[in-house]
Image: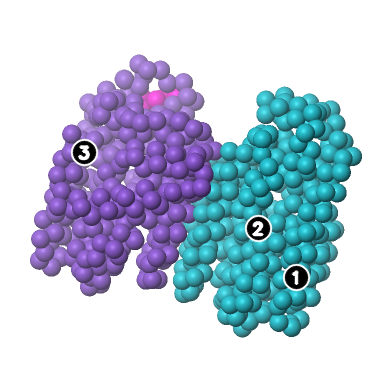
Chain colours: A cyan, B purple
Amino acid sequence: MEKMKLKMLYSDLKQDIDIIEKELEEALNSSSHLIYEASLHLLQAGGKRIRPVFVLISAKFGNYNIDKVKNVAVPLELIHSASLVHDDVIDNSDMRRGQHTVKAQWNNRVAMYTGDYIFARALEYVTKIENKKVHQILAHTMVEIVNGEIIQIEDKFRLNQNLKDYFRRIKRKTALLIESSCELGAIVGECDPKVVNNLKRYGYYVGMSYQIIDDILDFISTDKELGKPAGSDLLQGNITLPILLLQDHSEIKQFIERASQGTVTEQERLDMLEIVRKSDAIKKSMQISNQYLVKALKEVEALPNHPMKKKLRDVALFIGKRKF
Amino acid sequence: MEKMKLKMLYSDLKQDIDIIEKELEEALNSSSHLIYEASLHLLQAGGKRIRPVFVLISAKFGNYNIDKVKNVAVPLELIHSASLVHDDVIDNSDMRRGQHTVKAQWNNRVAMYTGDYIFARALEYVTKIENKKVHQILAHTMVEIVNGEIIQIEDKFRLNQNLKDYFRRIKRKTALLIESSCELGAIVGECDPKVVNNLKRYGYYVGMSYQIIDDILDFISTDKELGKPAGSDLLQGNITLPILLLQDHSEIKQFIERASQGTVTEQERLDMLEIVRKSDAIKKSMQISNQYLVKALKEVEALPNHPMKKKLRDVALFIGKRKF
């Protein structure tokens, strides 16, 4: 239902999103039946295509040409998908968005090469673009995303970490790719450098907020809404914002200890959720998310007048209120 | 010792290989200590740097400029290293070149992200290159390498396969990257299109021969020479040329059956090696390798006069005789 709302939000972009959807499918064509099936499974499991949407909206601030825009929108979504399939191996996740992951449906090996394949296809797509700056931004984004993934492994179950560690992780995990989506959309739209920078920063702030809300939802949503058990992040050792705000809570400490040994019972998981939900950590986390959204909206105000400004505002506000 | 011989073979290129070696180390610099350590471990475990060597030699046929040449040599070696570390996960290998693999020293997850990181770094390096054709060749090479890796999974323990299946695999596994090394070296050296094509084909033929010999050595070398147990390829289900030539041998069939169930004893491994070594499959495989080398040498003859022609011949002949 929430997904429907989001779709309505950018219904006027639907035609171009459909073009990108078709290109994404074509990009995954492979001589191997196995890899084609696995990557198509991943792609069709969906996602909200928010990265392509940010590319499209940003490009509208300049000289919008879908044939050029798609050349950055498609590889950005591919890079996102590839990193998801590798993350599922790391997190040992069997479910994502209510569907079996590639690693669960096939195995870790297939998931690894499917990710590699999608990465490589993204690159091949990027070669269609002449602008060297675009290549540099994409390559740098990929390096940082992987750096972030490794940091996430290093930080797992680590109790002595602070907010800075968390922000460093979610920047690389989520904000950077949304930032790059906005920046690259603006660049292929040949926007003024100032506009490029406003949109880039907008993407960064929206991305930070988006991930914080994602991390909150992992505690307050139902298993059904999440398509996986609530509290999965913490079970896997990912210490997110609500938990960092409850760091001194002895029962949470014990839970993390037991989670790291893999000995958590179902009742303990439910108890942990209860503690988090009843605490003020959720409210405080929302406030921090909202601070990022306020910053995002300020960047929107700094943009020149354009019908798409309302869209950027709507997307930011939607993210602040989303429940999936 | 054999490694020494190869080093002598290109001793006059040593200065430039050292430059590339240094760049490779710098390229792996990471904000994560874990990833830096793991990727450096992989790099230092060595390898013969044959891909950079092919780039250097090929570029010498045109306007040789090490500052340009290194921009393709470094990413090619990085792509090779990244694919090795992912292969070790797939093959479940604990040893490579007599050293612990990243997957063994750390774990599969670290190995996966180390590979991703090195891939991403390779890309970042590539953005230094203006020539669009270079980007396209590199991206296409990566797509095909991954396609090959998936095919290798699909073909594992599969008895009903033919020589075409095998050649298709080793082309993607090895020949393509050597082909691209020669082609890209020639392109950054701004060689004539005809020279580029000769060098490209030379690389392809040499690469095919190189992999066939690798596959032979897995049966005829000692465990110590290999740095892992002889016959590992077959134990892991990789049906290579000598085995394809022994396809109708009932004991080999039984061995593959048992290997696929993971129930092979040490004595059975030794018996299998004995069968392969005593058969004519090794000799026939050598003949096929030599056919590729003859084709490689023909491409050398078609090149314009140049002191590097001797080097190309020497490298091809060395590969034909190598014992490690």
Residue B182 in picture, x, y percent from top left: 27, 59
- Is residue A183 left or right of B240 when viewed as pictured? right
Q: Nearer the viewer, mark 2 or mark 1?
A: 1
- SS for tag 3? helix
- Is residue A153 left or right of B123 when viewed as pictured? right
Residue A44 in picture, x, y percent from top left: 67, 56
Gap between marks 2 and 3, in whole Å? 46 Å
Q: Which residues are magenta?
A: B251-258
Can you identify the residue that label 3 sits on? B3
Residues at marks 2 and 1, common chain? yes
Q: Main secondary structure of the magenta part?
A: helix
Q: Nearer the viewer, mark 2 or mark 3?
A: 2
Residue drawn 22% across the image and 61% down it: B58
Instruction: Return the mark for residue A298.
Output: 1
Marks 2/1 in contact by CB < 8 Å: the verdict is: no
Location of the N terminus of chain A by quadrant is bottom right
Instruction: Return the mark for residue A121.
Output: none
Gap between marks 3 and 1, in whole Å? 61 Å
